[in-house]
Protein backbone atom coordinates (compact mmCIF):
# COMPACT_ATOMS: atom_id res chain seq x y z
CA UNK A 1 0.00 0.00 0.00
CA UNK A 2 1.22 3.42 -0.84
CA UNK A 3 0.48 6.99 -1.80
CA UNK A 4 0.90 7.98 -5.44
CA UNK A 5 1.29 11.50 -6.84
CA UNK A 6 2.07 13.16 -10.14
CA UNK A 7 1.52 15.98 -12.61
CA UNK A 8 2.34 16.90 -16.19
CA UNK A 9 5.29 19.28 -15.78
CA UNK A 10 8.54 19.39 -13.81
CA UNK A 11 8.61 20.70 -10.23
CA UNK A 12 10.58 19.03 -7.44
CA UNK A 13 9.25 21.28 -4.67
CA UNK A 14 5.62 20.51 -5.51
CA UNK A 15 6.10 16.75 -5.72
CA UNK A 16 7.90 16.76 -2.38
CA UNK A 17 4.96 18.63 -0.88
CA UNK A 18 2.55 16.04 -2.32
CA UNK A 19 4.67 13.16 -1.03
CA UNK A 20 4.70 14.75 2.41
CA UNK A 21 0.89 14.82 2.45
CA UNK A 22 0.64 11.14 1.50
CA UNK A 23 3.42 10.11 3.88
CA UNK A 24 1.18 8.22 6.31
CA UNK A 25 -0.05 6.07 3.41
CA UNK A 26 3.57 5.04 2.87
CA UNK A 27 5.89 5.75 5.79
CA UNK A 28 8.59 3.27 4.70
CA UNK A 29 10.13 5.45 2.00
CA UNK A 30 9.49 7.94 -0.78
CA UNK A 31 10.66 8.49 -4.32
CA UNK A 32 10.56 11.03 -7.16
CA UNK A 33 10.98 10.90 -10.93
CA UNK A 34 11.12 13.99 -13.14
CA UNK A 35 11.75 14.92 -16.73
CA UNK A 36 10.70 17.87 -18.88
CA UNK A 37 7.20 16.44 -19.38
CA UNK A 38 6.18 14.83 -16.13
CA UNK A 39 6.80 14.51 -12.40
CA UNK A 40 5.93 11.36 -10.45
CA UNK A 41 6.03 10.78 -6.69
CA UNK A 42 5.54 7.85 -4.37
CA UNK A 43 5.22 7.13 -0.64
CA UNK A 44 5.86 3.45 0.15
CA UNK A 45 4.35 1.03 2.64
CA UNK A 46 6.46 -2.12 2.24
CA UNK A 47 4.35 -5.29 2.00
CA UNK A 48 5.81 -7.33 -0.88
CA UNK A 49 9.59 -7.28 -1.53
CA UNK A 50 10.73 -5.29 1.49
CA UNK A 51 14.11 -4.53 -0.11
CA UNK A 52 15.14 -1.34 -1.90
CA UNK A 53 14.39 -3.13 -5.20
CA UNK A 54 10.71 -2.47 -4.57
CA UNK A 55 11.06 1.32 -4.36
CA UNK A 56 9.10 3.54 -6.72
CA UNK A 57 8.64 5.22 -9.12
CA UNK A 58 9.92 2.10 -10.86
CA UNK A 59 11.12 1.68 -14.45
CA UNK A 60 11.37 -1.19 -16.88
CA UNK A 61 14.77 -2.32 -18.21
CA UNK A 62 15.27 0.44 -20.80
CA UNK A 63 13.53 3.13 -18.69
CA UNK A 64 10.87 3.68 -21.36
CA UNK A 65 8.01 2.91 -18.96
CA UNK A 66 7.67 4.19 -15.40
CA UNK A 67 5.03 3.60 -12.76
CA UNK A 68 3.89 4.94 -9.43
CA UNK A 69 1.54 2.36 -8.00
CA UNK A 70 -0.67 1.75 -4.99
CA UNK A 71 -2.10 -1.71 -4.38
CA UNK A 72 -1.46 -5.41 -4.59
CA UNK A 73 -1.75 -7.82 -7.53
CA UNK A 74 -2.32 -11.10 -5.72
CA UNK A 75 -1.72 -13.38 -8.70
CA UNK A 76 1.45 -11.54 -9.72
CA UNK A 77 3.64 -14.62 -9.30
CA UNK A 78 1.74 -16.56 -11.99
CA UNK A 79 1.93 -13.58 -14.36
CA UNK A 80 5.63 -13.17 -13.57
CA UNK A 81 6.32 -16.79 -14.52
CA UNK A 82 4.55 -16.29 -17.84
CA UNK A 83 6.57 -13.14 -18.55
CA UNK A 84 9.84 -14.86 -17.65
CA UNK A 85 9.06 -17.60 -20.17
CA UNK A 86 8.68 -14.83 -22.75
CA UNK A 87 12.13 -13.45 -21.95
CA UNK A 88 11.51 -10.75 -19.38
CA UNK A 89 14.19 -10.47 -16.67
CA UNK A 90 13.19 -9.14 -13.24
CA UNK A 91 15.41 -7.33 -10.75
CA UNK A 92 12.89 -7.46 -7.87
CA UNK A 93 10.31 -9.82 -6.42
CA UNK A 94 7.62 -7.11 -6.35
CA UNK A 95 4.25 -7.04 -8.07
CA UNK A 96 5.03 -3.50 -9.26
CA UNK A 97 7.63 -4.75 -11.71
CA UNK A 98 5.16 -7.36 -12.97
CA UNK A 99 2.73 -4.58 -13.92
CA UNK A 100 5.49 -2.79 -15.87
CA UNK A 101 6.43 -5.83 -17.94
CA UNK A 102 2.85 -7.01 -18.36
CA UNK A 103 2.01 -3.60 -19.84
CA UNK A 104 5.15 -3.71 -22.00
CA UNK A 105 4.08 -7.12 -23.32
CA UNK A 106 0.28 -6.78 -23.61
CA UNK A 107 -0.56 -3.07 -23.41
CA UNK A 108 -3.71 -2.24 -21.46
CA UNK A 109 -5.02 -5.76 -22.11
CA UNK A 110 -2.75 -6.73 -19.22
CA UNK A 111 -5.36 -5.33 -16.81
CA UNK A 112 -7.65 -8.28 -17.47
CA UNK A 113 -4.98 -10.63 -16.09
CA UNK A 114 -4.70 -8.86 -12.74
CA UNK A 115 -6.53 -10.06 -9.64
CA UNK A 116 -6.24 -7.53 -6.87
CA UNK A 117 -6.63 -3.88 -5.99
CA UNK A 118 -4.78 -0.97 -7.48
CA UNK A 119 -4.49 2.60 -8.60
CA UNK A 120 -1.51 3.65 -10.66
CA UNK A 121 -0.03 6.31 -12.87
CA UNK A 122 1.98 4.81 -15.73
CA UNK A 123 4.22 6.92 -17.96
CA UNK A 124 4.83 5.49 -21.44
CA UNK A 125 7.70 7.57 -22.85
CA UNK A 126 7.58 6.05 -26.32
CA UNK A 127 3.93 6.99 -26.78
CA UNK A 128 4.03 10.22 -24.74
CA UNK A 129 1.15 8.95 -22.62
CA UNK A 130 0.29 9.18 -18.94
CA UNK A 131 -2.16 6.42 -18.04
CA UNK A 132 -4.17 6.54 -14.83
CA UNK A 133 -5.92 3.30 -13.90
CA UNK A 134 -8.18 2.11 -11.11
CA UNK A 135 -9.08 -1.49 -10.20
CA UNK A 136 -12.36 -3.15 -11.13
CA UNK A 137 -14.36 -2.07 -8.08
CA UNK A 138 -12.45 0.97 -6.85
CA UNK A 139 -10.81 -0.59 -3.80
CA UNK A 140 -7.96 1.91 -4.12
CA UNK A 141 -8.72 5.63 -4.65
CA UNK A 142 -7.43 7.84 -7.45
CA UNK A 143 -8.22 11.56 -7.68
CA UNK A 144 -7.32 14.05 -10.37
CA UNK A 145 -7.56 17.70 -11.41
CA UNK A 146 -7.64 18.44 -15.13
CA UNK A 147 -7.74 21.64 -17.17
CA UNK A 148 -6.61 22.64 -20.65
CA UNK A 149 -2.99 22.93 -19.60
CA UNK A 150 -2.31 20.32 -16.97
CA UNK A 151 -3.24 17.14 -15.13
CA UNK A 152 -2.60 16.48 -11.44
CA UNK A 153 -3.33 13.13 -9.78
CA UNK A 154 -2.98 11.58 -6.34
CA UNK A 155 -4.24 9.00 -3.87
CA UNK A 156 -5.45 11.93 -1.76
CA UNK A 157 -7.49 15.05 -2.40
CA UNK A 158 -5.42 16.94 0.17
CA UNK A 159 -2.31 16.24 -1.86
CA UNK A 160 -3.87 17.82 -4.94
CA UNK A 161 -4.74 20.87 -2.82
CA UNK A 162 -1.01 21.60 -2.44
CA UNK A 163 -1.37 23.02 -5.97
CA UNK A 164 -2.83 26.45 -6.62
CA UNK A 165 -6.11 25.32 -8.12
CA UNK A 166 -9.56 26.83 -7.92
CA UNK A 167 -11.99 24.80 -5.87
CA UNK A 168 -15.02 25.28 -3.62
CA UNK A 169 -17.62 23.11 -1.88
CA UNK A 170 -19.52 21.09 -4.47
CA UNK A 171 -23.15 21.82 -3.58
CA UNK A 172 -24.45 19.05 -5.82
CA UNK A 173 -22.35 16.43 -4.03
CA UNK A 174 -23.33 17.90 -0.65
CA UNK A 175 -27.05 17.79 -1.39
CA UNK A 176 -26.88 14.25 -2.80
CA UNK A 177 -25.11 13.21 0.40
CA UNK A 178 -27.63 14.91 2.68
CA UNK A 179 -30.74 13.93 0.73
CA UNK A 180 -29.91 10.50 -0.64
CA UNK A 181 -26.91 9.23 1.37
CA UNK A 182 -24.91 9.12 -1.86
CA UNK A 183 -21.12 9.36 -1.86
CA UNK A 184 -18.64 8.25 -4.56
CA UNK A 185 -21.51 7.22 -6.86
CA UNK A 186 -20.01 9.09 -9.82
CA UNK A 187 -16.79 10.92 -10.70
CA UNK A 188 -17.57 13.96 -8.54
CA UNK A 189 -16.06 14.73 -5.16
CA UNK A 190 -17.15 17.23 -2.51
CA UNK A 191 -14.48 19.56 -3.96
CA UNK A 192 -15.53 21.36 -7.10
CA UNK A 193 -13.08 20.67 -9.99
CA UNK A 194 -11.44 17.66 -8.30
CA UNK A 195 -12.65 14.34 -9.72
CA UNK A 196 -12.41 10.69 -8.77
CA UNK A 197 -11.56 8.22 -11.50
CA UNK A 198 -14.43 5.75 -11.56
CA UNK A 199 -13.83 2.07 -10.74
CA UNK A 200 -12.81 -0.09 -13.69
CA UNK A 201 -11.74 2.98 -15.71
CA UNK A 202 -8.55 4.29 -17.30
CA UNK A 203 -7.72 7.90 -18.09
CA UNK A 204 -5.28 8.24 -21.00
CA UNK A 205 -3.57 11.63 -21.25
CA UNK A 206 -1.51 12.64 -24.27
CA UNK A 207 1.46 14.69 -23.06
CA UNK A 208 1.99 16.28 -26.49
CA UNK A 209 -1.54 17.35 -27.38
CA UNK A 210 -2.85 17.75 -23.79
CA UNK A 211 -5.90 15.78 -24.86
CA UNK A 212 -7.36 12.94 -22.84
CA UNK A 213 -9.97 10.22 -22.91
CA UNK A 214 -11.57 8.07 -20.21
CA UNK A 215 -12.48 4.48 -20.99
CA UNK A 216 -14.16 1.73 -19.02
CA UNK A 217 -11.90 -1.28 -19.16
CA UNK A 218 -13.95 -3.64 -16.96
CA UNK A 219 -17.53 -4.90 -17.06
CA UNK A 220 -18.53 -7.90 -14.91
CA UNK A 221 -19.25 -11.15 -16.73
CA UNK A 222 -22.11 -13.43 -15.80
CA UNK A 223 -20.93 -16.96 -15.02
CA UNK A 224 -23.15 -19.94 -15.74
CA UNK A 225 -24.01 -22.97 -13.61
CA UNK A 226 -22.68 -21.66 -10.33
CA UNK A 227 -23.43 -23.78 -7.26
CA UNK A 228 -22.59 -24.18 -3.55
CA UNK A 229 -19.43 -26.13 -4.28
CA UNK A 230 -17.89 -23.67 -6.76
CA UNK A 231 -18.84 -20.76 -4.50
CA UNK A 232 -17.13 -22.37 -1.55
CA UNK A 233 -13.98 -23.14 -3.54
CA UNK A 234 -13.77 -19.62 -4.94
CA UNK A 235 -14.22 -18.01 -1.53
CA UNK A 236 -11.56 -20.16 0.15
CA UNK A 237 -9.15 -19.76 -2.76
CA UNK A 238 -9.72 -16.00 -2.80
CA UNK A 239 -9.01 -15.61 0.91
CA UNK A 240 -5.80 -17.64 0.57
CA UNK A 241 -4.71 -15.72 -2.52
CA UNK A 242 -5.29 -12.36 -0.85
CA UNK A 243 -2.89 -13.30 1.98
CA UNK A 244 0.16 -12.96 -0.30
CA UNK A 245 2.53 -10.84 1.77
CA UNK A 246 6.05 -10.60 3.14
CA UNK A 247 4.68 -9.40 6.50
CA UNK A 248 2.18 -11.13 8.86
CA UNK A 249 -1.52 -10.97 8.02
CA UNK A 250 -4.42 -10.40 10.45
CA UNK A 251 -8.17 -9.73 10.37
CA UNK A 252 -10.47 -6.82 11.16
CA UNK A 253 -13.13 -8.94 12.86
CA UNK A 254 -16.64 -7.64 13.46
CA UNK A 255 -18.15 -10.93 14.62
CA UNK A 256 -20.48 -11.15 11.63
CA UNK A 257 -20.62 -13.98 9.11
CA UNK A 258 -18.24 -12.47 6.56
CA UNK A 259 -15.26 -11.50 8.71
CA UNK A 260 -15.71 -14.68 10.76
CA UNK A 261 -15.61 -16.80 7.59
CA UNK A 262 -12.34 -15.11 6.59
CA UNK A 263 -10.89 -15.68 10.07
CA UNK A 264 -11.82 -19.35 9.99
CA UNK A 265 -10.25 -19.87 6.56
CA UNK A 266 -7.07 -18.14 7.72
CA UNK A 267 -7.08 -20.38 10.76
CA UNK A 268 -6.74 -23.37 8.44
CA UNK A 269 -4.30 -21.69 6.04
CA UNK A 270 -1.80 -19.70 8.10
CA UNK A 271 1.02 -21.47 9.90
CA UNK A 272 1.32 -18.83 12.65
CA UNK A 273 -0.92 -17.36 15.32
CA UNK A 274 -2.53 -14.30 13.81
CA UNK A 275 -4.09 -11.16 15.26
CA UNK A 276 -7.70 -10.01 15.02
CA UNK A 277 -8.87 -6.46 15.80
CA UNK A 278 -12.43 -5.69 16.83
CA UNK A 279 -14.79 -3.00 18.05
CA UNK A 280 -16.98 -3.71 21.05
CA UNK A 281 -19.75 -1.60 22.59
CA UNK A 282 -20.20 -2.77 26.18
CA UNK A 283 -23.81 -2.67 27.35
CA UNK A 284 -25.15 -1.57 23.96
CA UNK A 285 -27.59 -3.35 21.66
CA UNK A 286 -24.94 -3.19 18.92
CA UNK A 287 -22.26 -4.95 20.99
CA UNK A 288 -20.85 -8.02 19.21
CA UNK A 289 -18.32 -9.08 21.81
CA UNK A 290 -19.92 -12.49 22.50
CA UNK A 291 -19.64 -13.40 18.83
CA UNK A 292 -16.09 -12.07 18.58
CA UNK A 293 -15.00 -14.10 21.61
CA UNK A 294 -16.62 -17.22 20.16
CA UNK A 295 -14.47 -16.79 17.04
CA UNK A 296 -11.42 -16.45 19.27
CA UNK A 297 -12.36 -19.61 21.12
CA UNK A 298 -12.40 -21.77 17.97
CA UNK A 299 -9.42 -20.25 16.12
CA UNK A 300 -5.69 -19.85 16.64
CA UNK A 301 -5.95 -16.08 16.89
CA UNK A 302 -4.86 -13.37 19.31
CA UNK A 303 -7.74 -10.97 19.87
CA UNK A 304 -7.50 -7.23 20.40
CA UNK A 305 -10.43 -4.93 21.21
CA UNK A 306 -11.22 -1.24 21.22
CA UNK A 307 -14.30 0.70 22.23
CA UNK A 308 -15.82 4.09 21.46
CA UNK A 309 -15.95 6.59 24.29
CA UNK A 310 -16.94 10.24 24.30
CA UNK A 311 -13.54 11.61 25.34
CA UNK A 312 -11.61 9.85 22.57
CA UNK A 313 -14.32 10.65 20.05
CA UNK A 314 -13.98 14.37 20.76
CA UNK A 315 -10.17 14.19 20.78
CA UNK A 316 -10.10 12.32 17.46
CA UNK A 317 -12.66 14.40 15.63
CA UNK A 318 -10.49 17.01 13.90
CA UNK A 319 -7.95 14.44 12.76
CA UNK A 320 -10.69 12.06 11.63
CA UNK A 321 -12.39 14.74 9.51
CA UNK A 322 -9.06 15.64 7.91
CA UNK A 323 -8.16 11.99 7.24
CA UNK A 324 -11.50 11.22 5.55
CA UNK A 325 -11.15 14.34 3.33
CA UNK A 326 -14.90 14.34 2.62
CA UNK A 327 -18.01 13.97 4.80
CA UNK A 328 -18.94 10.37 5.61
CA UNK A 329 -22.33 8.94 6.42
CA UNK A 330 -22.64 6.81 9.52
CA UNK A 331 -20.46 6.59 12.60
CA UNK A 332 -19.43 3.03 11.74
CA UNK A 333 -16.66 4.67 9.71
CA UNK A 334 -15.29 6.13 12.92
CA UNK A 335 -15.54 2.62 14.40
CA UNK A 336 -13.33 1.35 11.57
CA UNK A 337 -10.96 4.24 12.14
CA UNK A 338 -10.26 3.33 15.77
CA UNK A 339 -9.99 -0.39 14.94
CA UNK A 340 -7.22 0.39 12.44
CA UNK A 341 -5.65 2.76 14.96
CA UNK A 342 -5.50 -0.16 17.39
CA UNK A 343 -3.95 -2.36 14.70
CA UNK A 344 -1.31 0.29 14.04
CA UNK A 345 -0.49 0.54 17.74
CA UNK A 346 -0.02 -3.25 17.81
CA UNK A 347 2.35 -3.15 14.83
CA UNK A 348 0.01 -4.77 12.26
CA UNK A 349 0.50 -3.89 8.61
CA UNK A 350 -2.01 -6.09 6.71
CA UNK A 351 -5.59 -6.93 7.72
CA UNK A 352 -8.25 -8.83 5.81
CA UNK A 353 -11.87 -7.74 6.26
CA UNK A 354 -15.38 -8.75 5.24
CA UNK A 355 -16.37 -5.67 3.25
CA UNK A 356 -18.54 -6.61 0.27
CA UNK A 357 -20.02 -9.85 1.56
CA UNK A 358 -23.42 -8.35 2.30
CA UNK A 359 -23.65 -6.67 -1.09
CA UNK A 360 -22.66 -9.85 -2.96
CA UNK A 361 -24.96 -12.24 -1.12
CA UNK A 362 -27.91 -10.02 -0.12
CA UNK A 363 -27.03 -9.63 3.54
CA UNK A 364 -28.92 -6.42 4.29
CA UNK A 365 -32.56 -6.56 5.32
CA UNK A 366 -33.62 -4.00 2.71
CA UNK A 367 -32.88 -6.51 -0.06
CA UNK A 368 -36.04 -8.32 1.01
CA UNK A 369 -38.08 -5.25 0.04
CA UNK A 370 -36.87 -5.59 -3.55
CA UNK A 371 -37.32 -9.35 -3.44
CA UNK A 372 -40.92 -8.84 -2.33
CA UNK A 373 -41.41 -6.48 -5.27
CA UNK A 374 -39.81 -9.01 -7.65
CA UNK A 375 -42.24 -11.73 -6.51
CA UNK A 376 -45.15 -9.29 -6.76
CA UNK A 377 -44.20 -8.27 -10.31
CA UNK A 378 -43.85 -11.92 -11.33
CA UNK A 379 -47.33 -12.69 -9.92
CA UNK A 380 -45.81 -15.15 -7.44
CA UNK A 381 -48.15 -13.88 -4.78
CA UNK A 382 -48.33 -17.10 -2.77
CA UNK A 383 -44.57 -17.17 -2.42
CA UNK A 384 -44.58 -13.44 -1.66
CA UNK A 385 -46.95 -13.89 1.28
CA UNK A 386 -44.94 -16.87 2.54
CA UNK A 387 -41.64 -14.95 2.41
CA UNK A 388 -43.15 -11.88 4.08
CA UNK A 389 -44.47 -13.99 6.95
CA UNK A 390 -41.29 -16.06 7.36
CA UNK A 391 -39.11 -12.97 7.33
CA UNK A 392 -41.23 -11.31 10.01
CA UNK A 393 -41.16 -14.45 12.17
CA UNK A 394 -37.36 -14.84 11.95
CA UNK A 395 -36.10 -11.26 11.82
CA UNK A 396 -38.97 -9.40 13.52
CA UNK A 397 -38.42 -6.22 11.52
CA UNK A 398 -40.93 -4.44 9.29
CA UNK A 399 -38.50 -2.36 7.25
CA UNK A 400 -38.59 -4.58 4.10
CA UNK A 401 -42.39 -4.56 4.22
CA UNK A 402 -42.39 -0.76 4.49
CA UNK A 403 -39.91 -0.48 1.59
CA UNK A 404 -42.09 -2.79 -0.52
CA UNK A 405 -45.14 -0.63 0.20
CA UNK A 406 -43.13 2.52 -0.58
CA UNK A 407 -42.11 1.08 -3.96
CA UNK A 408 -45.75 0.47 -4.82
CA UNK A 409 -46.81 4.07 -4.14
CA UNK A 410 -47.29 6.50 -7.06
CA UNK A 411 -44.23 8.68 -7.67
CA UNK A 412 -45.94 11.85 -6.50
CA UNK A 413 -47.03 10.26 -3.24
CA UNK A 414 -43.57 8.77 -2.62
CA UNK A 415 -42.02 12.19 -3.10
CA UNK A 416 -44.52 13.74 -0.70
CA UNK A 417 -43.85 11.11 1.99
CA UNK A 418 -40.11 11.57 1.59
CA UNK A 419 -40.31 15.36 1.84
CA UNK A 420 -42.75 15.59 4.73
CA UNK A 421 -41.83 12.56 6.83
CA UNK A 422 -38.22 11.65 6.07
CA UNK A 423 -36.42 14.91 5.13
CA UNK A 424 -38.55 17.82 6.43
CA UNK A 425 -35.31 19.53 7.55
CA UNK A 426 -33.79 19.61 4.04
CA UNK A 427 -33.76 22.65 1.74
CA UNK A 428 -35.70 21.05 -1.08
CA UNK A 429 -35.53 24.17 -3.24
CA UNK A 430 -31.73 24.00 -3.26
CA UNK A 431 -31.86 20.27 -3.92
CA UNK A 432 -34.00 20.85 -7.00
CA UNK A 433 -31.77 23.72 -8.11
CA UNK A 434 -28.51 21.74 -8.03
CA UNK A 435 -29.79 18.21 -8.74
CA UNK A 436 -32.83 18.80 -10.93
CA UNK A 437 -35.22 15.86 -11.00
CA UNK A 438 -32.65 13.40 -9.69
CA UNK A 439 -33.88 11.24 -6.83
CA UNK A 440 -32.51 8.47 -4.67
CA UNK A 441 -31.69 5.54 -7.01
CA UNK A 442 -33.13 3.21 -4.35
CA UNK A 443 -36.57 4.55 -5.24
CA UNK A 444 -36.52 2.75 -8.56
CA UNK A 445 -38.90 -0.19 -8.77
CA UNK A 446 -36.52 -3.07 -9.37
CA UNK A 447 -36.00 -6.71 -8.64
CA UNK A 448 -33.45 -8.16 -6.24
CA UNK A 449 -30.63 -8.58 -8.76
CA UNK A 450 -31.05 -5.03 -10.06
CA UNK A 451 -30.92 -3.69 -6.50
CA UNK A 452 -27.74 -5.67 -5.82
CA UNK A 453 -26.14 -4.30 -8.97
CA UNK A 454 -27.07 -0.83 -7.72
CA UNK A 455 -25.39 -1.38 -4.36
CA UNK A 456 -22.31 -2.85 -6.05
CA UNK A 457 -21.73 0.08 -8.40
CA UNK A 458 -23.64 3.10 -7.04
CA UNK A 459 -25.01 3.25 -3.52
CA UNK A 460 -22.97 1.08 -1.18
CA UNK A 461 -19.73 -0.57 -2.26
CA UNK A 462 -18.09 2.53 -3.84
CA UNK A 463 -18.16 4.58 -0.64
CA UNK A 464 -17.63 1.68 1.76
CA UNK A 465 -14.42 0.70 -0.04
CA UNK A 466 -13.26 4.30 -0.12
CA UNK A 467 -13.88 4.83 3.58
CA UNK A 468 -12.13 1.57 4.45
CA UNK A 469 -9.10 2.67 2.46
CA UNK A 470 -8.98 6.05 4.18
CA UNK A 471 -9.48 4.75 7.72
CA UNK A 472 -6.86 2.01 7.29
CA UNK A 473 -4.27 4.02 5.40
CA UNK A 474 -4.44 6.86 7.91
CA UNK A 475 -2.79 4.33 10.24
CA UNK A 476 -0.45 2.87 7.60
CA UNK A 477 -2.37 -0.40 7.56
CA UNK A 478 -3.22 -2.22 4.34
CA UNK A 479 -6.82 -3.40 4.38
CA UNK A 480 -7.69 -6.25 2.02
CA UNK A 481 -11.22 -7.22 1.02
CA UNK A 482 -11.20 -10.74 -0.48
CA UNK A 483 -14.97 -10.69 -1.08
CA UNK A 484 -14.13 -8.25 -3.90
CA UNK A 485 -12.07 -10.86 -5.74
CA UNK A 486 -13.60 -10.41 -9.19
CA UNK A 487 -14.12 -14.16 -9.63
CA UNK A 488 -16.29 -14.25 -6.51
CA UNK A 489 -18.15 -11.08 -7.51
CA UNK A 490 -18.97 -12.45 -10.94
CA UNK A 491 -20.11 -15.72 -9.39
CA UNK A 492 -22.35 -13.92 -6.90
CA UNK A 493 -24.06 -11.71 -9.50
CA UNK A 494 -24.79 -14.85 -11.52
CA UNK A 495 -26.85 -16.48 -8.75
CA UNK A 496 -30.64 -16.58 -8.85
CA UNK A 497 -32.70 -14.66 -6.31
CA UNK A 498 -33.86 -17.88 -4.68
CA UNK A 499 -30.26 -18.85 -3.91
CA UNK A 500 -29.67 -15.56 -2.11
CA UNK A 501 -32.86 -15.05 -0.11
CA UNK A 502 -35.00 -17.96 1.00
CA UNK A 503 -37.43 -18.80 3.79
CA UNK A 504 -37.01 -15.37 5.37
CA UNK A 505 -33.20 -15.66 5.61
CA UNK A 506 -30.49 -13.53 4.04
CA UNK A 507 -27.31 -14.85 2.35
CA UNK A 508 -28.83 -18.32 2.01
CA UNK A 509 -26.36 -19.91 -0.42
CA UNK A 510 -23.30 -18.41 1.26
CA UNK A 511 -24.35 -19.70 4.67
CA UNK A 512 -24.97 -23.14 3.17
CA UNK A 513 -21.70 -23.26 1.25
CA UNK A 514 -19.53 -22.58 4.31
CA UNK A 515 -21.69 -24.05 7.06
CA UNK A 516 -18.92 -26.37 8.27
CA UNK A 517 -16.41 -23.49 8.44
CA UNK A 518 -18.41 -21.16 10.69
CA UNK A 519 -19.06 -21.60 14.40
CA UNK A 520 -22.73 -22.50 14.91
CA UNK A 521 -23.37 -19.33 16.92
CA UNK A 522 -22.21 -17.15 14.00
CA UNK A 523 -23.83 -19.14 11.21
CA UNK A 524 -27.25 -18.80 12.86
CA UNK A 525 -27.02 -15.04 13.36
CA UNK A 526 -30.02 -13.15 11.96
CA UNK A 527 -28.89 -9.61 12.78
CA UNK A 528 -26.43 -7.41 10.91
CA UNK A 529 -24.20 -4.98 12.82
CA UNK A 530 -20.53 -4.72 11.71
CA UNK A 531 -18.35 -2.14 13.53
CA UNK A 532 -21.51 -0.30 14.53
CA UNK A 533 -21.10 2.64 16.91
CA UNK A 534 -23.95 3.32 19.38
CA UNK A 535 -24.56 6.71 17.78
CA UNK A 536 -27.86 7.46 19.54
CA UNK A 537 -26.25 6.97 22.95
CA UNK A 538 -23.10 8.84 21.95
CA UNK A 539 -25.11 11.89 20.93
CA UNK A 540 -26.78 11.92 24.33
CA UNK A 541 -23.44 12.03 26.14
CA UNK A 542 -23.12 15.41 27.85
CA UNK A 543 -19.67 16.06 26.37
CA UNK A 544 -20.77 15.20 22.83
CA UNK A 545 -23.99 17.19 23.24
CA UNK A 546 -21.83 20.17 24.16
CA UNK A 547 -19.87 19.82 20.90
CA UNK A 548 -23.08 19.32 18.92
CA UNK A 549 -24.65 22.43 20.45
CA UNK A 550 -21.58 24.52 19.68
CA UNK A 551 -21.87 23.48 16.04
CA UNK A 552 -25.64 23.52 15.53
CA UNK A 553 -26.10 26.87 17.28
CA UNK A 554 -23.11 28.51 15.56
CA UNK A 555 -23.81 31.33 13.12
CA UNK A 556 -21.99 29.51 10.32
CA UNK A 557 -24.20 26.42 10.71
CA UNK A 558 -27.41 28.45 10.92
CA UNK A 559 -26.59 30.27 7.69
CA UNK A 560 -25.83 27.18 5.62
CA UNK A 561 -28.18 26.93 2.64
CA UNK A 562 -28.54 23.16 2.93
CA UNK A 563 -31.20 22.91 5.63
CA UNK A 564 -34.11 24.47 7.49
CA UNK A 565 -32.36 25.37 10.74
CA UNK A 566 -35.47 25.55 12.93
CA UNK A 567 -36.39 21.99 11.90
CA UNK A 568 -32.80 20.84 12.51
CA UNK A 569 -32.98 22.32 15.99
CA UNK A 570 -36.27 20.56 16.73
CA UNK A 571 -34.92 17.18 15.60
CA UNK A 572 -31.76 17.71 17.66
CA UNK A 573 -33.67 18.66 20.83
CA UNK A 574 -36.12 15.77 20.42
CA UNK A 575 -33.16 13.41 20.16
CA UNK A 576 -31.22 14.60 23.21
CA UNK A 577 -34.47 14.57 25.21
CA UNK A 578 -35.03 10.91 24.28
CA UNK A 579 -38.16 11.46 22.18
CA UNK A 580 -36.55 10.15 18.99
CA UNK A 581 -33.34 8.39 17.89
CA UNK A 582 -31.55 10.50 15.29
CA UNK A 583 -27.87 10.10 16.16
CA UNK A 584 -26.84 9.17 12.62
CA UNK A 585 -28.64 12.18 11.13
CA UNK A 586 -27.10 14.57 13.66
CA UNK A 587 -23.70 13.09 12.77
CA UNK A 588 -24.25 13.94 9.09
CA UNK A 589 -24.93 17.57 9.90
CA UNK A 590 -21.97 17.86 12.26
CA UNK A 591 -19.35 16.23 10.07
CA UNK A 592 -20.44 18.32 7.09
CA UNK A 593 -20.02 21.50 9.14
CA UNK A 594 -16.65 20.37 10.47
CA UNK A 595 -15.52 19.48 6.94
CA UNK A 596 -16.50 22.93 5.64
CA UNK A 597 -14.54 24.56 8.47
CA UNK A 598 -11.51 22.30 7.96
CA UNK A 599 -11.10 22.77 4.21
CA UNK A 600 -12.69 26.09 3.36
CA UNK A 601 -12.95 28.27 6.46
CA UNK A 602 -9.70 27.75 8.34
CA UNK A 603 -9.12 30.32 11.08
Image: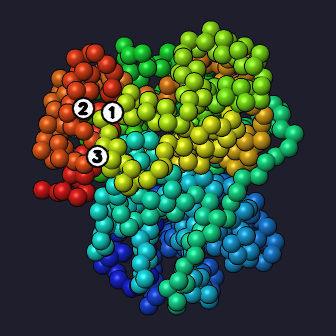
Q: CA distance from mark 1 to mark 3?
A: 12 Å
Q: Which residue is mark 2?
A: 567
Q: Residues within 10 Å of mark 2 (few under 14, many from 20)?
A: some
Sequence order check: which comes first, mark 1 or mark 2?
1
Indicate the quadrant where residue 243 lies.
top right
Nearer-the-camera pick, 135 or 195: 195
- Asked if disc 1 and disc 2 are in contact, CB closer than 8 Å, the reply is yes
How many labels sit on residues? 3
Give the structural element (helix, strand or loop) at label 3.
loop
Q: Residue furthest top?
A: 393
601 over 55 or under it: above or below: above
Nearest the viewer among 33 and 311 is 311
**Callout in the foreground (1, 3):** 1
Q: Is residue 383 left or right of residue 299?
A: right
For the view shown, which residue lies furthest in the right direction? 225
Q: Secondary structure at mark 2?
A: helix
Where's residue 322, x and y in %? 30, 51
Query: Residue 111: horizontal and vertical position, in percent?
Result: 69, 65
Residues marked 2 and 3 touching at CB (< 8 Å): no
**Quadrant hosting residue 306:** top left
* Residue found at x 77% / y 52%: 221
Q: CA gap, disc 1 to disc 2?
A: 7 Å
The answer to whether residue 137 is seen in the rendering is yes
Is residue 478 rendered to the left or right of residue 337?
right
The image position of residue 11, as x and y in percent, is: 35, 83
Residue tagged 3: 562
Residue in view at x 44 percent, y 41 percent: 180
Question: What is the x, y in percent for residue 40?
Answer: 45, 76
Q: CA distance from mark 2 to mark 3?
A: 12 Å
Mark number, residue 424: 1
Q: The C terminus is located in which quarter?
A: bottom left
Rendered residue at 33%/21% (across/down): 581
Amino acid sequence: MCGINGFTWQDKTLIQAMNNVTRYRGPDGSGIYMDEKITLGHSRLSIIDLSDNGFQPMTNADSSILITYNGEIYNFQDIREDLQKKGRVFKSTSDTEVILYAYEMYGLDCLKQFNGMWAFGLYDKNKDLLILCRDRFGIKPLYYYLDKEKLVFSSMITSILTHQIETAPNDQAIMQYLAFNLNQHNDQTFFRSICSLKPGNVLIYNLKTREHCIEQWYTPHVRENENDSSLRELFIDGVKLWTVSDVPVGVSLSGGIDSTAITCVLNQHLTYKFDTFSLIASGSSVDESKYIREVGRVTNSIQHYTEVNADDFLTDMDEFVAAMEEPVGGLSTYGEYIVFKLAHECGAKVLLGGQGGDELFAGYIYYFGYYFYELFRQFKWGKLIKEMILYLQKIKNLFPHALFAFLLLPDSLRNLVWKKKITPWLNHNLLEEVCGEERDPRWKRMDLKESMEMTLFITSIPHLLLWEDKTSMRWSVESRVPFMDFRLVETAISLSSEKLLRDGETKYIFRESIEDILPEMIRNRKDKIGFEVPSDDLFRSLKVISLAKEIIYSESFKKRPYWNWSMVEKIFLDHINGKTNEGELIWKWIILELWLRTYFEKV
